[in-house]
Amino acid sequence: MASLFVVGTPIGNLGDITYRAIETLKSVDYVACEDTRHTLQLLNHFEIKKQLISCRAQNEKFVSEKIIELLKEGHDIAYASDAGTPGISDPGAVLVDCVRNAGFDVVPIPGASAFATLISVAGSGGKTLIFEGFLSPKPGKRKHRLEELLNTKDAVIIYESPFRIVKLLKDIADIESTRRVVVGRELTKLHEEITSGTAQELYNNYSSRQSIKGEFAVFISGVKNLKNSDESTDN
């Protein structure tokens, strides 16, 4: 029986692709993807030639039916989002549900994600971590949700664009200025930058910059985790 392979791809540095991902992309009959232009560049880099199927958030449900028909014909298919692991603030979840409900196997091909990359260097992760992804662009909703997240006292990971990163950091600082924050900008890419400090310090840092470019992942430390870390150090 044919299968859908959900393939994690690099978030920046192409060297982060796995051997298994390359072999999967070579072996399948079709590659469905979030943006055919972006995935074509990735395939060209590794000299892989495949017929591409556009499967974006806007048409994911509709295209899922086409993909299921191809699976019924016996064709193995890979799915890749623009960068990282599909389904983590990227399309893919709808397709996976449809394919599995149709009776076909869905096979994970693990790879990079900004989520895991930032956690690995953030420290103070603790046992509980909330992944929120992108917050609402509306100021009121964004700040209200931040208040809810910080009130849990657990660590949080948020994604943000360069257009709203300063506003996000200001909101965090307004709620709890001393909470420890780690900001990852352009992770794994040429201009990767990882900065840490209190929410107020990072707001001061980024608000003073003339221009801000790149994609962001933001780690907000949990208060519980910081207490546990202090207790472990004292012992």
Image (spheres, rainbow, N blue to C red):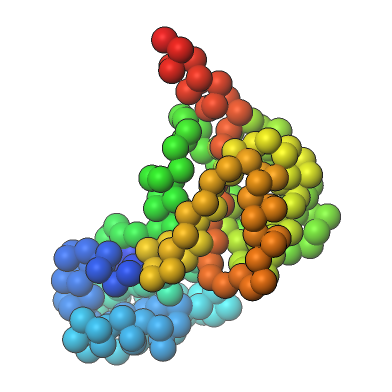
Task: Return the x and y of residue 50 as percentages of the image width and height.
Answer: 25, 87
Query: Residue most toward the top?
Result: 235
Viewer-side residue, 92 vs 225? 225
Q: Is residue 47 above or below residue 228?
A: below
Q: Residue 205 occupies which quadrant of the picture? A: bottom right
Q: Is residue 35 above or below residue 4?
A: below
Q: Is residue 66 above or below residue 143?
A: below
Q: Is residue 173 left or right of residue 6?
A: right
Q: Is residue 100 left or right of residue 199?
A: left
Task: Return the x and y of residue 129 as percentages of the image width and height.
Answer: 51, 38
Task: Return the x and y of residue 101 as percentages of the image width and height.
Answer: 41, 61
Q: Is residue 95 above or below residue 219?
A: below
Q: Residue at x 80, y 59 (%)?
A: 139
Q: Residue at x 44, y 37 (%)?
A: 123
- The answer, for residue 132, to whether it is visible in the render is yes
Tally the marks: 0
Q: Quadrant of the C terminus?
A: top left
- The answer, for residue 131, to whether it is visible in the render is no
Q: Residue at x 46, y 12 (%)?
A: 234
Query: Residue most toward the right?
Result: 140
Q: Residue at x 34, y 59 (%)?
A: 112
Q: Quadrant of the N terminus?
A: bottom left
Q: Is residue 147 left or right of residue 74?
A: right
Task: Return the x and y of residue 155 as percentages of the image width and height.
Answer: 56, 37
Q: Is residue 107 left or right of residue 225?
A: left
